[in-house]
């Protein structure tokens, strides 16, 4: 079973207008944000509480009205919400820029990652105000909002470049990206094989490291040991299966790599504060 099969069923935007909004509360099946990456860009703002975000090797604590985060394509990111309500606006920037001849060199630099855009814009910045207008315009959906959205995306890019809110790739950036690629390799194994019996050696081999060094490396990058993260990811997968299928708890445990039902229940309660049956019942109420 694939974790992605149990994502929330909702409109994903269209080919001609590739942008979508996620409003995330505690009841949302993706309230927790496991480490992942994608080829879209993403703006994130917090409406309540706080969201501790990891972006590649950086950690940000995003709170209400503190600022907005821009996650660029390919950036490894994950989040830990604390009594939080937050919103994510996902968009295919490359599609919006397709066929645009103005500023072609700047566009090429951004798309090729020769230029690395800043990821945080404080509440007193131009970029923050424009990003909030993007969220609000998309939510209101007034007639003609598609034109305004596209204009605001271009305005945001112009402000980022005009205010020099970026850095040019250098040797340190290259070293950092190499570490990220190694982490992605191990996370990819977890994402694709979490239902099977994975060992520390399997994850270390994927990152081309010794198990001893890999444990230290993984903990530095994610804040969790490899096994802790594997259990965390499996429980997130199990949570979605509890919500979107009628499968027995025993079957879901097996689907998520747990051969021991009692250990699965104990681990689930550790992460969710409820047993699997209690979790399913509370979300169906």
Image: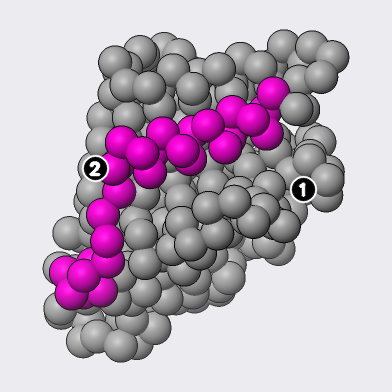
Query: Who's the residue at 49% across and 22% down the image?
Result: 130
Above or below residue 136? Residue 264 is: below
Dot 1 falls on a residue whose secondary structure is: loop
> Which of the labelled discs sits on residue 247, or is there none?
1
Dividing the picture into quarters, in which one does residue 214 lie?
bottom left
Give x and y (percent) for residue 74. Answer: 47, 61
Secondary structure under badge 2? strand
Cα distance in 3D space between marks 2 and 1: 37 Å
Disc 1 crowd rating (10 Å Cα; few below 14, some 14-19, many 20+) is: few
Query: Does residue 44 appear in this view?
Result: yes
The quadrant where residue 48 appears: top left
Q: Nearer the viewer, residue 277 or 13?
A: 13
**Count the marks: how many?**
2
Residue 145 position in % (x across, y down) = 76, 20
**Crowd band around label 2 with a 10 angstrom C-alpha radius: few (<14), some (14–19), many (20+):** some
Q: Main secondary structure of the magenta part?
A: helix
Q: Is residue 200 left or right of residue 238?
A: left
Q: Give the residue pinned by disc 2.
A: 59
Q: Is residue 87 left or right of residue 248?
A: left
Q: Find residue 192 and report its horizontal and vertical position in percent.
A: 58, 70
Magenta-drawn stretch contains 169: yes
- What segment carries the magenta color? 148-176
Pick whichever, 244 or 165, lies toward us.
165
User: In the figure, is residue 258 to the left or right of 75?
Assistant: right
């Amino acid at each position: 079973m694939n974790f992605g099969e149990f994502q929330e069923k909702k409109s994903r935007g269209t080919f001609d207008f590739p942008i979508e909004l996620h409003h995330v509360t505690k009841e949302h099946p993706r309230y927790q944000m496991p480490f992942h990456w994608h080829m879209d860009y993403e703006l994130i703002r917090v409406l309540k509480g706080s969201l501790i975000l990891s972006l590649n090797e950086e950690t940000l604590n995003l709170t209400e009205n503190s600022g907005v985060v821009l996650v660029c394509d390919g950036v490894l990111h994950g989040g830990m919400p604390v009594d939080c309500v937050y919103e994510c606006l996902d968009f295919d920037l490359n599609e919006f820029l397709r066929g645009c001849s103005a500023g072609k060199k700047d566009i090429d630099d951004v798309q090729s990652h020769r230029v690395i855009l800043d990821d945080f814009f404080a509440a007193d910045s131009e970029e923050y105000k424009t990003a909030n207008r993007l969220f609000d315009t998309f939510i209101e959906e007034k007639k003609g909002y598609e034109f305004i959205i596209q204009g605001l995306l271009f305005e945001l890019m112009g402000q980022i470049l005009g205010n020099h809110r970026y850095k040019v790739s250098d040797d340190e950036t290259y070293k950092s990206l190499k570490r990220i690629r190694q982490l992605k390799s191990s996370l990819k194994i977890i994402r694709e094989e979490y239902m099977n019996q994975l060992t520390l050696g399997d994850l270390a081999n994927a990152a081309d490291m010794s198990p001893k060094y890999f444990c230290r490396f993984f903990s530095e990058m994610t804040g969790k040991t490899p096994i802790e993260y594997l259990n965390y990811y499996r429980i997130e997968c199990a949570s979605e299966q509890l919500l979107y299928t009628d499968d027995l708890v025993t079957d879901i445990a097996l689907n998520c790599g747990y051969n021991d039902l009692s250990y699965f229940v104990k681990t689930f309660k550790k992460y969710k504060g409820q047993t699997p049956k209690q979790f399913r019942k509370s979300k169906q109420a």
